[in-house]
Structures are given as structure tokens and as C-alpha cells.
Image (cartoon, rainbow, N blue to C red):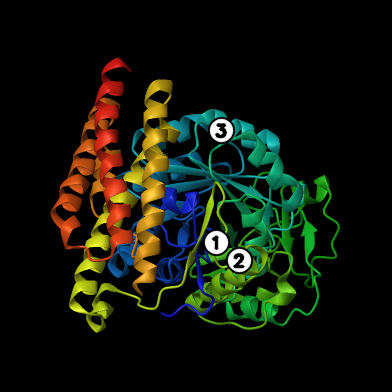
Amino acid sequence: MKNSTGVKLHTTACDLLGCKYPIVLAGMGGVSRSELVTAVLQAGGYAFLGMVREPPELMKSEIHKVRSNTSREFGVNIIPAATEPELLNSQIEVCIKEKVASVCLFWDVYPDLIKQLKDEGILVVHQVGSIKDAKEALAAGVHLLIAQGVEAGGHVRGILPLRELLPQILHLTDVPVLAAGGIVDGNDVAEILVSGAGGAVVGTAFLATKESFAHDFHKQRIVNTEQDDTVLTNLFHINWPFGALTRVLPNSVTHTTCTEEFQIDSKKEIIGKNDDDPVYLYSTDSPLRTTTGNVESMAIYSGCGVYRIKKVESAICRLNSMMSEAEIKLTELFGIQGYQSDNVQLYSSPCFSSIEDINESSGSDKKTIIFLEELLSAEYAGARVTLRSMLDIENSSFKEIFRSIYYDEVRWCDMLTNWLYRLGYEPSYKVGEFYMKAINIKDYKKRIDYLNKGQAWVVKKIKGMLTDIDNLALQEDLNDMLINHVANIALTKKSKDVA
């Protein structure tokens, strides 16, 4: 795929999650099923399966469906506070046995659960709506936060708009923070990236796609909305902790006043079915493809800004449009040389989409591209390992070792990426098996040893190819990379012995 904007975006959160682009599919219950998750992953984003209160058999099936269509990493979204303990334990067991890359949690913070997932090598993400929740999640050791503004569709945890909440949470921590709430296009993505977020979590805009498991009525309500008239209400309360707010589009029941007595005394009136399960009036269940009955009276979740979503299209088209708009906006703000911050890199444009396409290039360029792609895969794996280790480890000496290597790995990823773009090739950001093998090494001294084996491989690779590089500027960059890796190997060996 050619990129018409001239720039590419990549963030620290992308390194942690293992995705190309800083756009994340929200784990919308019922809606974010395997078809939508696969589409977003194949388009270069990250995605969470929405498995809220789903039975373990369905979870396994959906995980396997995604894996049968892509090798990219993805996560599972569950909500402990809205799930019966026995079912929750079964869900956690599935996540562990299936070795899912990440688990996203929402609502109350469960420190023991977070520790359990981390001990199994699973990346833990927590969505929060307040400083209080953020502090609790950070104290429990999460790897990544999602700051959810009150503009979000579906269940809303806090009361602050995103532009107020995000900077407060960013001020708390060095852990990557994603932003959620009312993000529907690329201008929104650009705004939150400039504000310091590591990426955008998108729900409503992906709900209105062909691959979404939402009911067609729900999708059409979204694209036919002409003004920002969402409703924040506690009306849809069945199946959820008491007093929770949801943001929905208005319908025939949203005018109802929902008092505490109403929530306690309201009788369960069946208004439809989802497969064989009843859907109750005022339930939190939104209408899905498999839902029948009075769908108009169900929860039609939607975030603010919905009026800007004009059509139902494929998820890849929606993600590509968002990326292009974000890139154009950031280029206008910062120029084509790139917006470089602690968490965002902006690169010049590629013109090839895959390694197969480089057959069009000359023999020497083809050899160089393959070589640089191999190096980038190794460096990207190293960056992901060191970033994850830096977030996991408590020993300050080890933390500094990993921090030092991480920033070097990012520097060389940037260098290699820019050279590949100059040669007309879009990097794949593949990491192979190295990343998971390293993460599964619990002893940090042994993990450093394994990391050094990877660095030694890079040294050997560069030495074997350096004299064959015709471009003197590239040769100089590779030589600098070689020297840095040799120095890092020596430094880590010495530091590890005294840590």
C-alpha cells in the first residue's frame, strides 16, 4: 500500500504492543469479535477481543479464529467487576492457557489479578477514568494505561473530559498511556499524540464498520446521526455494578429517569434475544448481528463526535483514513522531517508494501533492503524486550541497564527505518520468536545474557555485510551501530555482575 501523505507514525506504545500504528481497537463487548480484530491487526493497528462475560468456549473459539488469519499479537478485554467470580476465573484460565499477548481490564482495580497475569508473562493494560484509578493501577504494576475521557461511548468510568484527564495521568507516570473517548478521525488522533499519548483507543468509529459484530440497526444509527446528541445515563444497568454511567444515542427509553429505587425495583422485561439468551429492557447488552427483538430500545452505545462518522466501511479503510488524516495534520504542524518526541516518530514515506515487492529494485538494493529488514527485526525485538523488562523490573540497577539499551535500540530502529524508506520499502516490524522467548525468561540476569546473544548476532551480521554497502552514509551509520552494540555488550556484562 502506498502512503499518500509522505509520513509514517510510530510510538513507544507501538513498541510495547507490537503494532505498526498507534491506533487500537477498543475491546467492545460483543462487537469486537474475531473478524473485526483480524481486520484491524492486518491494517497495522492493535486490537482487543471484547470478551466481557463471554463463556470460555467462545473465548477460545474467537482467539483461534484470529490466530488462523494473522500472526500479529492481540489482546483480550475482560471486566472483572461485571463478571461472576466463577466465570471470571474461567476467563483468566483461558487467557493463560492460550498465552494471549495482553489482557485489558476496566472498572475496579484488582491487584491480585494483575499480579497473576504478569507472573504468566501477559502484558497488562488497564483503562481508567480518574487519577485515583490510575494510581491504583500503577501501584498494582500495570504495563500500560488507557485514559478514558467522559466523551467515550459505552460504559464511562470518570467525569473528566479527555483533554483534562490525559495530561494529569501523563504527569503521574513514565508508563505509556493511550487515550480513549470521542476519537473518531485522524485529527483527533493527531491531537492526542501531540498531547503526549502513545496512541488512540477507538470504539465507535470501528463499530460502524463492515467487520463489526454490531447489529446493522446500531451501525445505521451511528452513520445517520447529524449532531452530537449522545446521552450520558445510568438507565442501562442490568449486568453491571450499581450506578454506572453509559453514553448512548437517544432512543424511545432514554427519557426515563433512573433513580436508585428504579434500578433496584425494575422488573426484568425481555425485549429480545441474542442467540438463545434473553435481552432485558435496561440491560447493558447492545444489539449484535445475532440479536432479534426490539433492538431500538436496547443500549445504542456511541461516543461523542459520532456525527462525523458518515458511512459504514471496512475497518482497513477506516484505519487508513485515520492514519492519513493524522499524518497530514502532524506534517502541517511539524514538517516532513518528522515530529520527534519522547513517544512519537514521524518518518518519510515508503512505496513498497512487502518484501516480495522489492524484486522491482536493483540487485544491490534488494540485497541491502533484505539485510536492513533483518537488522530492523532484531532491533525491534530488542526494543520491545527492553521496554517490557524496564516496566516489569523493580531492581533499579537492572532497570537502568534495560533503559539504556532500550533507547539505543529505538535509535537504531529509527535509523534503519529511515534508510528502508529511502530505498522505497515499508518496514514490517516483525520480531520472530525472540521477543516471547526473552520475556519468558524470568531471571533478569539470564534475560540480559539472552539479549546479548541477540546483540552479538547483530554485530556479526553487520561485520559480514559492511564492506558490501556502496552508500557511504549508510555504511557510516551501520558502523556507528556496530560500535554501539559492541559497547553495550561489554557494558551489560559488567553491569550485570555488580547488579
| Mark 3: amino acid | Leu
> How many other residues sit within 10 Å of disc 1, few (<14), some (14-19) or many (≥20)?
some
Query: Label 3, on which residue?
Result: 138
| Mark 2: amino acid | Gly
The span from disc 1 to disc 3 (Cα, nearest Å) is 31 Å
Q: Which mark is residue 283?
A: none
**Direction from residue 309 to residue 441 in the image, left or right:** left
Estimate the x, y position of residue 23 in percent, counting from the top left. Answer: 53, 62
The span from disc 3 to disc 2 (Cα, nearest Å) is 35 Å
Query: Label 1, on which residue?
Result: 338
Question: Mark 2 or mark 3, which is nearer the start of the sequence?
Answer: 3
Towards the viewer: 46 or 69:
46
Image height of 191 relative to 436, above or below: below
Estimate the x, y position of residue 180 in percent, counting from the top left. Answer: 63, 55
Image height of 376 relative to 223, above or below: above
Q: Quadrant of residue 283?
A: bottom right
> How many other residues sit within 10 Å of disc 3, few (<14), some (14-19) or many (≥20)?
some
| Mark 1: amino acid | Gly
Estimate the x, y position of residue 381 in percent, counting from the top left. Answer: 31, 49
Question: Mark 3 or mark 1, which is nearer the start of the sequence?
Answer: 3
Query: Label 2, on which residue?
Result: 335
- Residue that extends furthest to the front in the rendered view of this protein: 472
- Element at label 3: helix
Q: Which quadrant is home to the C terminus?
A: top left
> How many other residues sit within 10 Å of disc 2, few (<14), some (14-19) or many (≥20)?
few
**Direction from residue 245 to residue 204 in the image, left or right:** left
Give the number of the mark in front: 1 or 3: 1
